[in-house]
Image: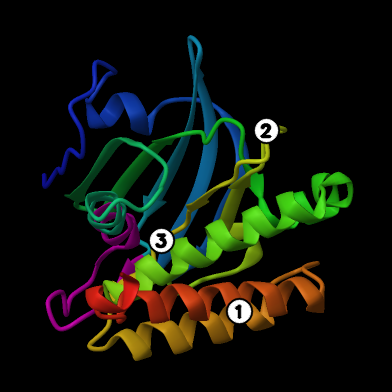
Amino acid sequence: MMATRSLTDPMPADFDNWWLAKGQWVEPPNLRRGGDSGVQLIVRGNEFLYCKRQSGHLYRSLRHPWGQPTALRELQAYRALADIGLPVPQVVYGAARKTPAGWQALLVTRRLEGYCSLDEWYAGPAAKASGEQRQAVLECLADCLARLHRHRWQHGCLYAKHIFVAAPADGSAGVALIDLEKARRRLTVAGASQRDIGQLARHRGAMPEADWALLLAAYQRAMAAAHRPASAEL
């Protein structure tokens, strides 16, 4: 068996315990990539956890020509983005094992408390938000994406439903990225940026055109600031 732990955690780390855990399906198993993958919400005490469970569901690359579970790629992406200070769900457990029947993989993360998807935000809270709060959310998202792309990381599935926002009443804002099973490093910043921004343009959900223009402007400022010489800021 090949297993990969992500964080030291007092919760049970045994693969079978998580594999057999029961919860409510929030993403019923879907059949693709030569296997199936689904997500359950598991409650342990006061903890709300999302458990992605996969059988097969492989991706192939030069490093893994015979295939490796997409959950392991997502685990590696969560670790890498956390290391560069990007907000992502906290990983509780991540592991994979190869059985006679094929690969099995798990990825368990804590629920993002106080967050909702960008789709959900536009469907409700955004309508009541002030112009300043909407601007704060968009600028926070722009900064998050700019940092992601400056490190040559491409999300790979940048839909509104995979961007989570927090917009408390105090006027602050937070953004977190989820569902990183297609995330990967690109050779250039431009390569990562163009693919993600183009994808979000097509899958931004209910974001109105005016907000999209604000987001693009904030993103361009954030990207430009990264290349500005220190002397220019004095």
**Residue under the image location 35 percent in, 43 percent down:** 107
**Mark seen at residue 180:** 3
Which structural element holds mark 2?
loop
The magenta-colored residue range is 58-76
- First along the sequence among labels 1 and 3: 3
- First along the sequence among labels 3 and 2: 2
- First along the sequence among labels 2 and 1: 2
Judged left or right of residue 21, residue 135 is: right
**Residue under the image location 53 percent in, 67 percent down:** 142
Q: Residue furthest right?
A: 127
Residue 232 lies, in percent from the top left, at 31, 79
Q: CA distance from mark 2 to mark 1?
A: 25 Å
Pick the front one: 204 or 62: 204
Magenta stretch containing residue 117, yes or no?
no
**Mark seen at residue 170:** 2
Q: CA distance from mark 3 to mark 2?
A: 30 Å
**Residue under the image location 36 percent in, 33 percent down:** 19
What kind of residue is marked 1?
Leu
Q: Quadrant of the C terminus?
A: bottom left
Q: Tell me if residue 134 comes above or below residue 201 in the rendering.
A: above
Q: Nearer the viewer, mark 2 or mark 1?
A: 2
Q: Tell me if residue 98 comes above or below residue 10 in the rendering.
A: below
Q: CA distance from mark 1 to mark 3?
A: 22 Å
What kind of residue is marked 2?
Asp
Q: Nearer the viewer, mark 3 or mark 2?
A: 2
